[in-house]
Image (spheres, rainbow, N blue to C red):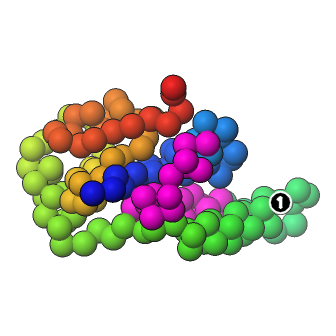
Amino acid sequence: MAKLYILDTDHISLLQNGNAMVTKRISQNKPESLAVTVITLEEKIKGWLNKINNSNNEPFKPNSQLLWAYKGLSDEIEFFKSIQLLAFDNRAYEMYQSLVLQKLKRIGTQDLRIAAIAKSVNGILVTRNWRDFENVPGLMLEDWTIT
């Protein structure tokens, strides 16, 4: 069975910012072996919406961030059309509930949901955030920013 690499939010940001190591590793994989979670989509979209909301109070300020923020939101939506998106489905939700009951240390709700999705599809989570994710039993991790 082919490996499924699930890119965490940090690796998506690195890719979008042209990180050479991450870009190289992604280019070495078939598109169908790469995915992101709907939680990452949520995090990225919320980030752009926050930037838009922060700019709403400054419509006439020179160098307003509003145009930049809307462009970023639009680009984000286009990016997520080009990569496999993993849902927070019943299997992931059941895995999430199981992980919550384990009262894992140092892992936030969003990261726990990402971990649940990754475990539910038997995927490998690609992240730099080992500090939190290494506490999730059975979660396979890789960091594509190190050799």
Can residue 5 be seen here? Answer: yes
Q: Secondary structure at mark 1?
A: loop
Q: Is residue 114 visible?
A: no
- Give coordinates of residue 96: x percent, y percent: 18, 57
Residue located farthest toward the front when viewing the structure as drawn:
1
The foreground one among 106 and 33 is: 33
53 left or right of 96?
right
Type of amino acid under label 1: Ser
Residue 73 pos. (x, y %): 65, 68
Residue occupying the point 91% across, 58% down: 62
- Residue 21 x, y percent position in the rendering: 61, 36
**Disc 1: which residue:** 64
Looking at the image, residue 7 lies above or below residue 78: above
Q: Does the magenta run of residues contain 84?
A: no
Relative height, residue 7 to residue 60 (above, below): above
Q: What secondary structure is the magenta-colored segment mainly?
A: helix
Q: Quadrant of residue 138?
A: top left
**Residue 118 picture quarter:** bottom left
Q: Residue at x 27, y 57 (%)?
A: 1
Magenta residues (range): 24-53
Taking the spot 51% from the left edge, 44% from the top edge, the residue there is 10
**Which of these two is toward me, 60 or 91?**
91
